[in-house]
Image: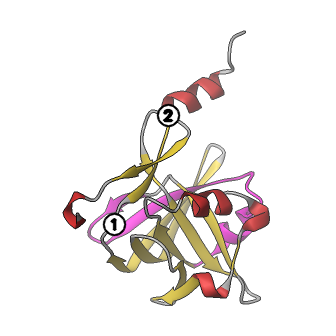
Amino acid sequence: MHAPPEQGFRRAMSAFATGVTVVSAARADGRMSGITVNSLTSVSLQPRLMLWCLGDQSERYDHFATADAWGVTVLGGDEAALAIRYARAERETIAAHEAETFANVPVLRAGVAHFACRTHDRQRAGDHLIIIGEVTDFRVKPGDALTFFRGQYGRAVDTRST
């Protein structure tokens, strides 16, 4: 049996190891939502821009596609459970004790780096929305980072902190 081209493409792309993040944004009712993202990439240093991609079939599309400000938490090597949790729409709400406000946006207390962003641009591409954010603040902590490779979570070791 021959796999559809989309599955083959997905399998080939899984050979590209990525970091794992949770993008978070406040809702109008004060709740905070999170979504697991491994499409995060730096775009520019001057100005500081990064992007991530939001699937148009995501149950959280309307919220994140219209958010003017959002945070990014780069997950640590032992935080795969958080990646799995925020990958599921029914578990998107971030409890107050799990988050903090960093530069006026919610981020998880977990993680090895945080970015505060405001939406700079949005571009449709295929079945995704590319969200480009201007980084208004950032911070980094020592520690291993969570990775995703061939459908499995792993760890990038921070040799500078050992």
User: How many marks can you see?
Assistant: 2
Identify residue type, mark 1. Answer: Gly
Seen from the viewer's position, the closer of residues 81 and 60 is 81
Alpha-carbon span between mark 1 and mark 2:
26 Å
Q: Residue at x 62, y 43 (%)?
A: 126
The residue identified by callout 2 is 13
Seen from the viewer's position, the closer of residues 39 and 50 is 39
Q: Quadrant of residue 28?
A: bottom right
What quarter of the picture does the N terminus occupy?
A: top right
Compared to 62, does 14 lie above or below?
Answer: above
Compared to 141, does 4 lie above or below?
Answer: above
What quarter of the picture does the C terminus occupy?
A: bottom left
Seen from the viewer's position, the closer of residues 59 and 132 is 59
Q: Earlier in the sequence, mark 1 or mark 2?
A: 2
Identify residue type, mark 2. Answer: Met
Q: Which residues make up the magenta segment?
A: 41-68
In the rendered image, residue 50 lying in the magenta stretch gets the answer yes
In the rendered image, residue 64 lying in the magenta stretch gets the answer yes
Compared to 134, does 40 lie above or below?
Answer: above
* Left/right of residue 158 with respect to residue 137 in the rendered view: left
- Residue 107 location in percent, x, y? 53, 79
Crowd tier of the residue under label 1, counting other residues whose Cα lies within 10 Å: few below 14, some 14–19, many 20 or above: many
Q: Quadrant of residue 160?
A: bottom left
- Residue 158 location in percent, x, y? 28, 59
The residue identified by callout 1 is 143
Q: Residue at x 34, y 79 (%)?
A: 139
Q: Residue at x 56, y 29 (%)?
A: 11
* Left/right of residue 122 with respect to residue 155 in the rendered view: right
